[in-house]
Image: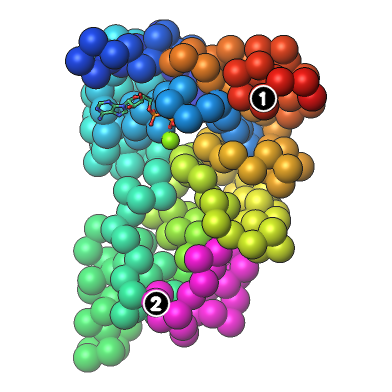
């Protein structure tokens, strides 16, 4: 059963039609990847799904609710979370504090005052949850490090932990392993896979490094010229003639 359904999404800027009728269904608990050459419309599509843009026509349905016009805040509240929708990681806060700040409106702020007056039970539960999620995303032992001390890859893991703290049921990520070394890139996808398995969270990920991502994703959607031109398993999509021509560059 689909957790996210896109129906006939169209979006133009000036006279430039960037999305030209995108239909898509993302299965609940799946890890889906969106590929396509530069300018094919991937980021614009993610912008329409996360509520940053309202499409000119078409619908975005998340878990049975029409979220097309809810805006960034509304989709976030519904549990459809783009990692940067969460307040940005604070360089001066520790990884654990950054997780806590993502834990809900005002709760993080109230937690930051806790050293002055002790923790209330609600905050203790929040800290327990943050510690457990920090370990799920591979940041065990890193909770005390400041945001600014984390490597690029560890910041990505922190983003994932923060998305989960915010109550995400589906996470949208734009190039989570860009610029990350191969070992850590594999670890990020391994963590995504495990979080999907243990928490049932659905992922839609834009990513160019297919050599790594294709080992982990269930389903791939290929875009060209503002449309989905192929959909299937990584094997199916990478042998699709239109994908080879428009994206993979000539003969396989
Ligand atoms: N806010 C915007 N205003 C005008 N043109 C835009 C805007 N956002 C994207 N575009 C145009 O839409 C096209 C697709 O861009 P984008 O969705 O970023 O592609 P991708 O992420 O696949 O590289 C590009 O031609 C880009 O210039
Ligand atoms: Mg893009």
Query: Which portion, as a residue range, is magenta?
Result: 131-154
Q: Residues within 10 Å of mark 1 (few under 14, many from 20)?
A: few
Report the residue at 40% width, 44% height from top: 82
Residue on which disc 2 sits: 148
- State the residue lying farthest toward the front: 250
Report the residue at 46% width, 22% height from top: 40
Disc assigned to residue 249: 1
Quarter occupied by residue 229: top right
* Nearest to the observer: residue 131 or residue 229: 229
Quadrant position of ligand 2 = top left
Q: Where in the figure is residue 32, as x and y percent of width and height? A: 60, 33
Residue 203 visible, this orientation: no
Report the residue at 47% width, 42% height from top: 174
The earlier-in-sequence mark between 2 and 1 is 2
Q: Where in the figure is residue 202, as x and y percent of width and height? A: 56, 38
> Does the magenta portion include 2?
no
- State the residue lying farthest toward the bottom: 116
- Horizontal side of 160 relative to 231 (left or right) equals left
Quarter occupied by residue 133: bottom right
Residue 8 visible, this orientation: yes
**For the residues carrying marks 2 and 1, which lies nearer the camera in this image?**
1
Disc assigned to residue 168: none
Quarter occupied by residue 240: top right
**Is 198 situated above or below 95?**
above
């Amino acid at each position: 059963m689909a957790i996210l359904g896109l129906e006939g999404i169209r979006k133009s800027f000036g006279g430039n039609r960037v999305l030209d009728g995108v239909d898509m269904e993302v299965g609940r608990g799946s890890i889906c990847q969106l590929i396509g050459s530069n300018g094919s419309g991937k980021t614009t599509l993610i912008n329409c799904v996360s509520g940053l843009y309202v499409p000119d026509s078409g619908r975005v349905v998340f878990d049975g609710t029409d979220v097309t016009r809810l805006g960034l805040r509304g989709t976030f509240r519904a549990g459809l979370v783009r990692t940067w929708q969460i307040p940005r990681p604070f360089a001066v806060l520790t990884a654990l504090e950054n997780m806590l700040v993502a834990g809900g409106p005002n709760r993080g702020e109230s937690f930051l005052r806790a050293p002055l007056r002790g923790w209330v039970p609600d905050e203790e539960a929040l800290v327990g949850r943050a510690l457990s999620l920090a370990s799920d995303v591979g940041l065990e032992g890193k909770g005390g490090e400041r945001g600014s001390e984390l490597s690029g890859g560890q910041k990505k893991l922190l983003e994932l932990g923060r998305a989960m703290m915010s109550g995400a049921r589906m996470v949208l990520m734009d190039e989570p392993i860009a610029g990350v070394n191969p070992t850590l890139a594999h670890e990020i996808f391994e963590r995504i896979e495990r979080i999907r398995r243990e928490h049932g969270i659905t992922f839609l990920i834009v990513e160019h490094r297919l050599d790594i991502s294709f080992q982990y994703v269930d389903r791939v959607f290929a875009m060209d010229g503002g449309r989905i031109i192929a959909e299937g398993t990584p094997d199916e999509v990478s042998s699709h003639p239109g994908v080879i021509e428009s994206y993979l560059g000539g003969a396989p």
